[in-house]
Amino acid sequence: MQTNFEHFALGSMLGKPDMPPKDNGSLRFGAPWQRQAFGMALGLSKQGVFEWDDFRSEMIASIVAWEAVHETSDPSWDYYEIWLTVLERMVQRSGIIGHPNDASF
Amino acid sequence: MQRFEYPTDRETANAARARALESLLIEKGVITSETVDKIMSIFATEMGPFNGAKLVARAWVDPAFKMLLAENTMAAVEKMNFVTKGAGAEGEHMRAAINTPEVHNLIICTLCSCYPWPVLGLPPYWYKDPSFRARAAREPRKVLSEFGLDIDPGKEIKTWDSSAQIRWFVVPERPAGTDGFTEEQLAALVTPESMMGVSMVKPPAR
């Protein structure tokens, strides 16, 4: 089956706990920074900075950890805030931007 | 007071974090300022239910186009000037199943979850659910009624099983009360669910 990375990446999340919010067949972003964070993660993984599967494992683990200490209906839930935190972590771990304690990060 | 300010601060903080990360990655030469837009344009403009909706609306106003869509779907898609023209990933061999007063069509994919992304966008979560796939093939009428869609007993239901070779989508029936609508107005009524065959296109709200 022919596929490209963007399809693969999103397709792998369908029906899983880390599926991003959707609206009528399209991705739903509540603010430009959410789209920015989403696009960066796909772009970095596409370039091989980290494996998509590893990013997703971190996402799922973070969501599970959040749910362990919050009610499901807690209004402070923010999917893309978790996404951004995981993205920062994956970037740090990859070493491409230098040491995590580097002043620039 | 604190409670009301919190979300705004949080939004501002998140926006600043995302901006800082992107700037840093650009500075280090890992990505460029266009990386995000390039990736996202694939989702925002090149593939999505808006493409399918345009095909459906055109078919509603142009009987010759409708016939072409049924007989040579890819040739019809080519005429639409979509960015992807339906070619490439998972859209290469799309076929349209046209709803009529006698036949209702439903698309499924029993083997995996093949889906015509370029015209329908992201599949809903249940499309991948094995029990939906199995049951829709076996008892489509019952499954549709669980979706809130009761098909007239006199109407035939055809299920179309997508595969790596052929991705099906449904051209729903034009709703009543849309005489004189432009293609654009019509396209706005078409939902991804209606192009999967699990709902009808609803008449415009009055």
Image (tube, rainbow, N blue to C red):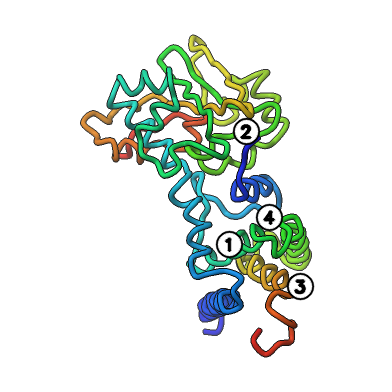
- Amino acid type of the residue that numbered disc 3 sits on in the rendered structure: Arg
Nearer mark to the viewer, of 3 and 4? 3
Residue located farthest toward the front when viewing the structure as drawn: B29
Q: Which chain is home to disc 2?
A: B
Circle 2 is placed at which residue position?
B114
- Amino acid type of the residue that numbered disc 1 sits on in the rendered structure: Phe
Nearer mark to the viewer, of 1 and 4? 1
Name the residue at 65% across, 19% down. B139
Tell whether label 2 touches label 1 (CB within 8 Å): no
Task: Report the Cα–Cα distance between label 1 and label 4.
Answer: 12 Å
Task: Report the Cα–Cα distance between label 1 and label 2.
Answer: 24 Å
Q: Position of residue A38 (x, y in %)?
A: 58, 62
Q: Residues within 10 Å of mark 2 (few under 14, many from 20)?
A: many
Whichever of callouts 1 and 4 sits on the residue coming sooner in the sequence is: 4
SS at mark 2 in the image: loop
- Per the rendering, the mark at residue A18 is 4
SS at mark 1 in the image: helix
Q: Residues within 10 Å of mark 4 (few under 14, many from 20)?
A: many
Most foreground residue, B152 or A10: A10
Task: Report the Cα–Cα distance between label 2 and label 4.
Answer: 20 Å
Circle 3 is placed at which residue position?
A93
Res B10 visible: no
- Amino acid type of the residue that numbered disc 2 sits on in the rendered structure: Cys
Circle 1 is placed at which residue position?
A38
Name the residue at 53% across, 28% down. B93
Nearer mark to the viewer, of 2 and 4? 2
Quadrant location of the N terminus of chain A?
top right
Whichever of callouts 3 and 1 sits on the residue coming sooner in the sequence is: 1
Task: Report the Cα–Cα distance between label 2 and label 3.
Answer: 34 Å
SS at mark 3 in the image: helix
Q: Position of residue B137 (x, y in %)?
A: 65, 20
- Amino acid type of the residue that numbered disc 4 sits on in the rendered structure: Asp
